[in-house]
Image (cartoon, rainbow, N blue to C red):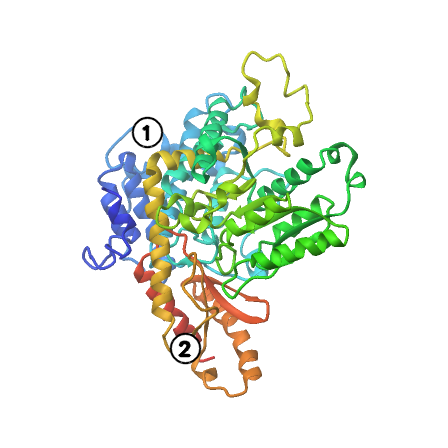
Amino acid sequence: MAQQGFWSLGGDNAGANTGNQSPSTPRAWCQAAASKLSGGLGSKLCALLNVGELEKGAEPAAKQPPETETAACGCNKSCKCTKASVVFSDLYSTDLLPAMDSDAKTMIFLQEVVDILMAYIVESFDRDTKVIDFHYPNELLQKNNWELQSEPASLDEILISCRATLKYAIKTAHPRYFNQLSTGLDMVGLAADWLTSTANTNMFTYEVAPVFVLLEYVTLKKMREIIGWKDGQGDGIFSPGGAISNMYAMLLARFKMFPEVKEKGMSCVPRLAAFTSEHSHFSIKKGAAALGIGTESVICIKVDESGQMIPADLERRILEAKQTGLVPFFVSATAGTTVYGAFDPLIAISDICKKYNVWMHVDGAWGGSLLMSRRHRWKLDGVERANSVTWNPHKMMSVPLQCSALLVREEGLMQSCNNMHAVYLFQQDKHYDLSYDTGDKALQCGRHVDIFKLWLMWRAKGTIGFEAQIDKCLELSDYLYNKIKDREGYEMVFNGTPQHTNVCFWYLPPGIRYMEDKEERKKHLHKVAPVIKARMMEYGTTMVSYQPQGDKVNFFRMVISNPAATLEDIDFLIEEIERLGQDL
């Protein structure tokens, strides 16, 4: 298959050279592209990227003879196009569509924007470029005029602002960017995002978003089938992120037990209790605060050494809550915790939820995508018994931000919980099936089209393509774990093979490895990760996250979700940590 080279773990292109250049560099890429792309786009990319290479500190190129007049438009041969005659410093947004006779100016302006974007995209995958051009906030504020003005800026200034914004942006597609759970840049997903913005519609009714509403229906049904719900039955919606999806679940659980709360509020229900693990995402408490349940009503359950919820402690705390007059209504199990990447034992938790008639939610924002992998989906055994599931394709599936789904087993519950029957949107005498007017079951009125990115990528990759991508990332994390677990200067945060791509470790510089005073050693170790991270950002070579956890001092949390990463990038990370931390 054509995709095997991309999905391979090794950097197949890393060692090949064209002259003195790797094919992964912008110059080599655009030299090949110049002969393939029409309109001189390949040549324009070379010119744009050459500027970027000079900024990296390369020697200034020898002075070139002045370009011919025909080259001003970016074409490879003599032409009669109008691009060369467009002076953006004399044009403003009012000169673009829908202004009269503005088609050509609009097309040329948008082509300039695409040129900027293409240059940035190619640089993002180049290992010779920085992940970040870091500046402190006050420095960055002074470098450019970011203030909003009363008078309009010219289109030339607008293009300058586009370039400046990307110059200081983090290259999240870079193969050595490991800082967040959402990394990488998929080209089909990017194309879908551009199309979505071009269509610029709202997801609340079929009449204004017919195709997108149908695609959401088809995709959510497919996701429910993968979870294991019979024939994909149930409901769901795409929301602005996992935190909102989790809050939706809590909202539905409360309504299911006390439907009167919708009209009468919290004064008509007893004091509720929700349960989640000590390592769960903060959004569970945030949702309780937003819904008026209160953070004190969220009871945190103990976890074992690997970060998994202990079912016996869950049952004990449910019984304690009932004895004190609280009403248990919601348990959130986590499939892939944010820091350790742990998967709670869903079968045991579901047995307890069934026993005490409590809504079971699975927060699979990070780990839900493992359902796409035949090799790893066993980690979510029991998910089919949940009442609701959060699943974020913008994480392990690399769908461009944002893309989060809340899947619900009971059909119609979301509609009953959230509908307000706004007759100016949801008229009951429309001439089509009203079940496709999905807006009334959402908390939002205006809802962004998040579905097309996922749907188009799924069409492009197939389920097996997503599976290969996910399996590759987990293989890379195994490689990292096996390489450092017994390496001098490294200590693992917990024993055992990581369950997800999270690899948590301390790096101990030579100066503190043999400290006998444990408290002094702990005090020094707490400062190591922040200093190394700061140096990473200042050099711009890579980015990886760190944090404390409970009584454990700061440690590195390496996560791999970028399909562009290779074994060589993992090796580079280890060597870079050691280089930047050897003097600490």
Looking at this view, is 459 or 352 the one in front?
352
Q: Residues within 10 Å of mark 1 (few under 14, many from 20)?
A: few
**Residue 342 seen in the figure:** yes
Q: Outermost residue toward the bottom?
A: 516
Query: What secondary structure is found at the residue carrying circle 1?
Result: loop
Query: What secondary structure is found at the residue carrying circle 2?
Result: loop
Residue 497, percent from left and from top: 40, 63
Residue beneath the point at 23% across and 55% down: 12
Q: Is residue 76 above or below residue 581?
A: above
Residue beneath the point at 31% across and 60% down: 567
Q: Outermost residue toward the left?
A: 19
- Quadrant holding the N terminus: top left
Q: Which mark is residue 81?
A: 1
Q: Nearer the viewer, mark 2 or mark 1?
A: 2
Residue beneath the point at 59% across and 46% down: 243
First in residue order: circle 2 vs circle 1 = 1
Residue 87, percent from left and from top: 43, 36
Q: Residues within 10 Å of mark 2 (few under 14, many from 20)?
A: some
> What amino acid type is highlighted by mark number 1?
Cys
Question: How far, Cα to Cα, is label 2 from label 1?
Answer: 62 Å
Q: Is residue 31 above or below residue 193?
A: below
> What amino acid type is highlighted by mark number 2?
Gly
Q: Which mark is residue 489?
A: 2
Q: Outermost residue toward the front?
A: 355
